[in-house]
Structure formats: structure tokens, C-alpha cells
Image: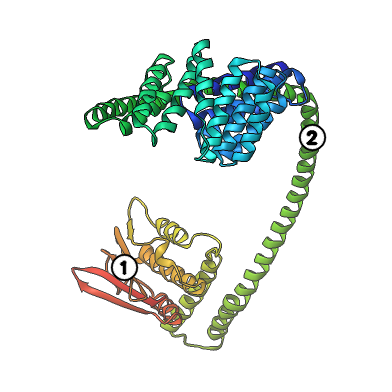
Amino acid sequence: MEKHDSADAGRCLVNMAIIQEQFGDNYGGLETGISALKYFNDKDSSLHNYLSINYNTLGILSSKLTNYNKAIEFYEKAILFSKDSVNKNLYTNNLANNYRRNKDYNVSIKILSTLLNKNKQNTNYKSRILDNLAFTKWTHNAQHNPLSEFQEALKIRLKDQDNWGLNSSYSHLSDYYAKKNQDSALVYARKMFAISKEIKSPDDQIEALQKLISLEDANNSKQYFKVYQKMNDSLQTARNKAKNQFALIRYETEKNKADFLKAKAESTERQNHIIKQYVALAFALITIIGFILYLKKRKKIHQQEKLLEVKNTELKYSKKVHDRVANRIYQILSQVENKEHIDRDSLLFGLENVYETSRDISYENEEINENQNYFEQLQSMLDSYSSDAVQVIFHGNNEKLWEGVNFQIRTEVYLILQELMTNMKKHSQADKVFLKFTNESSHINISYTDNGVGIKTHSPKNGLQNMENRINSINGKINFDTETNNLLKINISFPI
């Protein structure tokens, strides 16, 4: 914010604080006045007048909030920055009054006495200082008689038609007579009430009414109390309204400030925009070149890894075929060559065994991936057996079901169900298959049902034996039921 704009904003806030003080918004005015200070440079003498006015307002507000120590601090600063003798006298008088309110009577009397000696020729200031000095001495020492000083100040104020001063004189005289002569106290209280209405000071009217309520007889006191109550309610309502009178101005001020800061930030951003673009472009080029080189290197490594993986897989399954299939075939060939009479069933059993072994190897080539979601892999395998001729339905296979089941058990179950579905596809002639998965008492149960031809031709002997061997390896059980409604039912159960 420019220097001129800053000072203007400060001056606006000072005037707002003064208006808030006049309307009784003490806390709001204090906040506004303190906010104004940040817009003034106290080293700039051209702003000292506004600083002194603002500090005086802050002193008045602090005094009204009974924070007299803070009020004294603000008044001293108001005097420090004031270059006008009239205002300086006013601020000094306010300072002395706050020392009195803070019960520092000797300090207050000293300041007022010094001030009175300087203003003996100025009747307006003389009456004010004389009245305050007499009131302070009497407040400090009840034996002191301030009446002559009160009367002298009153005489000057009547002559000068100083209504604000008369209001103060009537208040002090009423307080003085309150315990000495109630009739006189009542007279001055009535005069204070009348003059406070004339100067339109609601706070002084309230004060005058309080005096009248305590001094009048019962009937008049009741009437004054009603007036007091009504005025006090109106005053509170007006002050509550006053608290929000500058809400829109504060909003606009903050908005303008925000807009200014935004514009300044945008200007700075534009100045650096070209440099940022070049830096970003250079960084992007380096990143792209680096990424391309990385991808090329990564692709080469990946290709090498894949090639190695294929070779290892080929070696692995070549060894299995040699050890488990070729050797078994050689054994059968030897039997055929060395025996004149070959048992046909025995030969078929041997060949079927070779077939089952080779199929097991092919299954192993389709082992499940430990890093992928198991229930989805199982579901995908079961779905693969669905066709236009066979409808496969399964229920209960979900991720939660397989929580806590180790990889070995999952693999065996996968191969058991694969064996079962393969036998179904080849031998059962079923067109509907239903599998239900449940978890009961820390056991997983799998119920298999199809509407095929039954168990007798459903699976070769070795296929059933493979399933039983696998289920036994995980401490499970497999039961076959062909007696219910011409349906094949197989129940598989194993502990988690």
C-alpha cells in the first residue's frame, strides 16, 4: 500500500473509532483505533496530529472500560504527539482524571495544579481544571471543602454558557451535597438532568436519573426509575445497532486491501513469469530426455528378464516331463516288450496314470499368482468352464472368505476345483453346475452340484484319487453323494 493510501486508511479508522466511542461501542471503537495505528508512521510529523487524536480516543475508550492503567498510557502518548496547546491541555486534563479514577490522587492533584497555573487567564480551561481539581481533592480527602471552587467554576460556566461544563458542575455539586443537604443535592441533580437532555448526552442523563432515583421521595423516585429503565433499554439497543454500523465499511476496506495485495502479487508474478517458463521448459526437456533413456534401458532389461524367465520355465517343465512322463512311458514300453501276454486293464491303468501326470504338469503351469487377488483368480477359472451348453453358477466366493487361508491351501483348493471342473466338462454331460462357498466354525465348505450322469462315469479313478490326495494334504474331507434327486453332490471341507 502506498504511503498516501496508508495514511488515508488510518485517518478513516480514527474517525470511525471516534464515532463508535460517541455511540457507546467501546470494544469496537478500541479495536478500530488500535487497527488505525499500523497505518501511521510515528516518525512522520505530518501524521502526529492524527496519532494524538487517536491515542486520546483510545484513552477515553479504555477509561470507559475501567482499564485506567491502559488509559493513562494512551493519554501520555496523545500528549507526546500533540503539537496543539489546546488539545494538549485537554489530553492532560483527561490524564489527571484517570489518575484520580485509578486512585493515584496525589499525581492527579499535581498535574491539575500545574495545569491550572498555566491557564489562569483562559476562563474556559480554568473552570474545567478548577472543578476537576476541587473534585479530586474532595474525593481524596472527605474533610476538604471544595464548595468555593465548585461555585467559582459554576459561575464561569454560567457566564460562558458552557453547557457541557455546567453538566459536570451540577454532577459534582449534587455528589457533594448528597450526604450534607439532600434538598440541595436534589436541585443540582434536576439541573444536571435538564442540561444533559439539552446537550443530548444519554450517558449523563442516565447518571442524573440515578442521582434522582436515590434522592427523590418514593413516588417521584418511581417515576424517575421508569424513565431510567426506558432510557437505559433504548441506549443499549442503540449501542447494539452501533456495533454493526461499520461492518460494511470494514468489509469494503478489507476487500480493497485484499484486491490491492492480489494485484501486487499478480504484478510480481508477471515479472517472474518468463524466467519461470524458461526454467520449467529446461527442466521438462531434461526430464523427457532422462525418461526416454530410462524407458529404453528398462525395456531392454525387461526383455532380458522375460527371455530368461521363458528359458527357465522351459527347463523346469522339460525336466518334469522327462522325470515324470517320459520315464513312466519307458516303463510301460518295457513291460510291453518283456511280457508275452499283456493285461489290457493294467496297460490302460498305466496309460491313464501317465495322462493324469501330464495333466497335473499342465495345471502347475497355470499356478495361481500370490500377488493377485485369489478369489478373483478362482472366479475367473470357474467362469472359464461356462459355455452355451454348460451354465456354471457359484455363490459365496469373495475376498473375505479367503482371509487367513495360507497360499499352500489356496493352491491345493484351486487345483482340486480345476480337476473337478475338468472331469465335469469331459464326463458328466451336465448342463448346470452350482458351487456354494461358506465359512463355518473355522472351516471352509464348498458344495458342488451338477445334473449330469453321476459318479460312475463322472471321473477316471486317478482323477478322484488326485482330488482325495490333495484334500488330505490340507487335512480336509471330500464326500460324494449321488442318491439325491439324480444329482451329483460333492462336499469339500477343510480347516482354515
Q: CA distance from mark 2 to mark 1?
A: 61 Å
Camera-nearest residue between 287 and 308: 287
- Position of residue 131 measured from the top left corner of the image (x, y, whole percent): 54, 26
Q: Amino acid at mark 2?
A: Leu
Closest to the camera, between mark 2 and mark 1, is 2
- Position of residue 451 measured from the top left corner of the image (x, y, whole percent): 26, 63
Task: State which tag comes first along the sequence, 2 or 1.
Answer: 2
Q: For mark 1, what is the residue? A: 448
Q: Amino acid at mark 1?
A: Tyr
Give the answer, above or below, for where 428 lies relative to 251.
below
Q: Tell me, for residue 279, which label it has, or none.
A: none
Q: Secondary structure at mark 1?
A: strand
Please identify the quadrant where the N terminus is shown: top right
Query: Residue placed at 72% from the left, 61% from the top?
Result: 308
Camera-nearest residue between 209 and 489: 209
Q: Is residue 38 visible?
A: no
Which quadrant holds residue 180?
top left
Q: Secondary structure at mark 2?
A: helix
Residue neighbourhood size for the residue with mark 1, other residues' Cα within 10 Å, grouped as few (<14), some (14–19), many (≥20): many
Residue neighbourhood size for the residue with mark 2, other residues' Cα within 10 Å, grouped as few (<14), some (14–19), many (≥20): few
Query: Residue placed at 74% from the left, 17% from the top?
Result: 46
Q: Tell me, for residue 285, which label it has, or none.
A: 2
Give the answer, above or below, for where 449 lies relative to 307.
below
Please identify the quadrant where the C terminus is shown: bottom left
Q: Relative to residue 209, is residue 373 drawn left or right?
A: right
Spot the residue most to the top: 160
The answer to whether the residues at label 2 and label 1 have Cβ atoms under 8 Å apart is: no
Give the answer, above or below, for where 66 lies relative to 153.
below
